[in-house]
Image (cartoon, grey):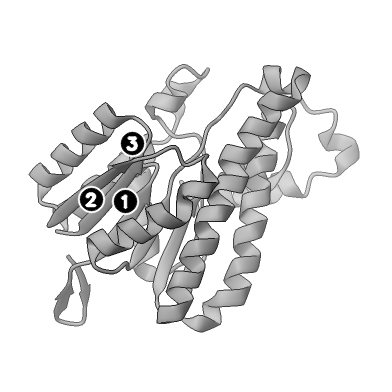
């Protein structure tokens, strides 16, 4: 349960991309708090396993929908269904995204376009609907996984990074528009995190612990933070990287 003063509040939370490693770890925390959850993911078997685990951990209510979130035409009906199932909505948590294949994207526009669509266009569609819903109620939190990779383009992942840069800029503008309406927009910028998606990456054993990242995300949502770098050291690291002169930066092997 989240608490306000001495009053326990059972939150209603929508999770988009619920089978991603960071999302699943975050949901486990919410389940132990007795939250009501609506989970959306593409893989039916993984979604069923996650939902069963969350029920066992104490979630007050769990409902699910199998959906391809790249299909933006389906978003209005999907989101309306989620709200109706939960009987309202307090928090929308977007963890939908892909790393993609940088090498292929350098050679094939369609590969790059797929990464950009999944990581930018699809979230923009979802967040636009959710923002309008929350503004009508003058309350709510939209929390979105972006990435530190969006703070500056690097040759190793600039297609993925550019999709996250666009998403972060969109969220900045949306926050500027609707914060005065009582709606919090939280941009979450994780550094490399140990999940199934990153397990094959070089140096993954040094990545951040997913449970620690999830705990920081839950705390940021509770405190209605605007931007979260997680782990925290990524904020000064990216400040330095953003301010390296271009004449120097372009020679670095990043």
At 85% from the left and 32% from the top, the residue drawn is: 250
Circles 1 and 2, Cβ within 8 Å, touching? The answer is yes
Q: Secondary structure at mark 2?
A: helix
For marks 3 and 2, the one nearer the N-term is 3
Q: Circle 2 is placed at which residue position?
A: 29
Disc 2 crowd rating (10 Å Cα; few below 14, some 14-19, many 20+) is some
Closest to the camera, between mark 1 and mark 2, is 2
Residue 227 appears in the figure: no
Q: Secondary structure at mark 1?
A: helix
Q: Which mark is residue 215?
A: 1
Circles 3 and 1, Cβ within 8 Å, touching? The answer is no
Whole-percent x, y for residue 163 in the image: 65, 42
Q: Marks 3 and 2, Cα distance to the nearest angstrom?
A: 14 Å
Closest to the camera, between mark 3 and mark 2, is 3
Q: Which mark is residue 19?
A: 3
In the image, taking residue 246 as reference, residue 190 lies left or right, namely: left
Exactly how many numbered labels are in the figure? 3
**Between 47 and 206, the one nearer to me in the picture:** 47
């Amino acid at each position: 349960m989240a608490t306000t003063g001495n009053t326990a509040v059972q939150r209603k939370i929508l999770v988009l991309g619920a089978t991603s490693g960071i999302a699943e770890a975050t949901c486990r925390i919410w389940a132990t708090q007795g939250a009501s959850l609506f989970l959306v993911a593409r893989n039916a078997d993984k979604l069923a396993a996650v939902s069963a685990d969350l029920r066992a951990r104490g979630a007050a209510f769990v409902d699910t929908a199998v959906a391809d979130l790249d299909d933006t035409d389906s978003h209005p009906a999907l989101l309306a269904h989620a709200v109706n199932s939960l009987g309202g909505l307090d928090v929308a948590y977007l963890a939908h995204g892909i790393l993609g294949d940088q090498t292929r994207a350098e050679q094939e526009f369609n590969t790059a376009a797929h990464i950009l669509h999944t990581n930018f266009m699809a979230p923009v569609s979802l967040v636009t609907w959710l923002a309008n819903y929350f503004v009508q109620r003058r309350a709510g939190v939209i929390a979105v996984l972006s990435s530190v990779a969006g703070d500056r383009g690097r040759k190793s992942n600039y297609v993925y990074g550019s999709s996250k840069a666009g998403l972060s800029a969109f969220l900045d503008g949306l926050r500027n528009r609707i914060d005065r309406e009582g709606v919090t927009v939280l941009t979450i910028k994780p550094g490399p995190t140990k999940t199934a998606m990153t397990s094959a990456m070089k140096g993954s054993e040094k990545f951040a612990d997913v449970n620690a990242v999830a705990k920081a995300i839950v705390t940021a949502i509770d405190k209605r933070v605007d931007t979260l770098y997680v782990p925290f050291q990524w904020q000064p690291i990216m400040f330095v990287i953003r301010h390296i002169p271009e004449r120097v930066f372009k020679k670095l092997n990043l």
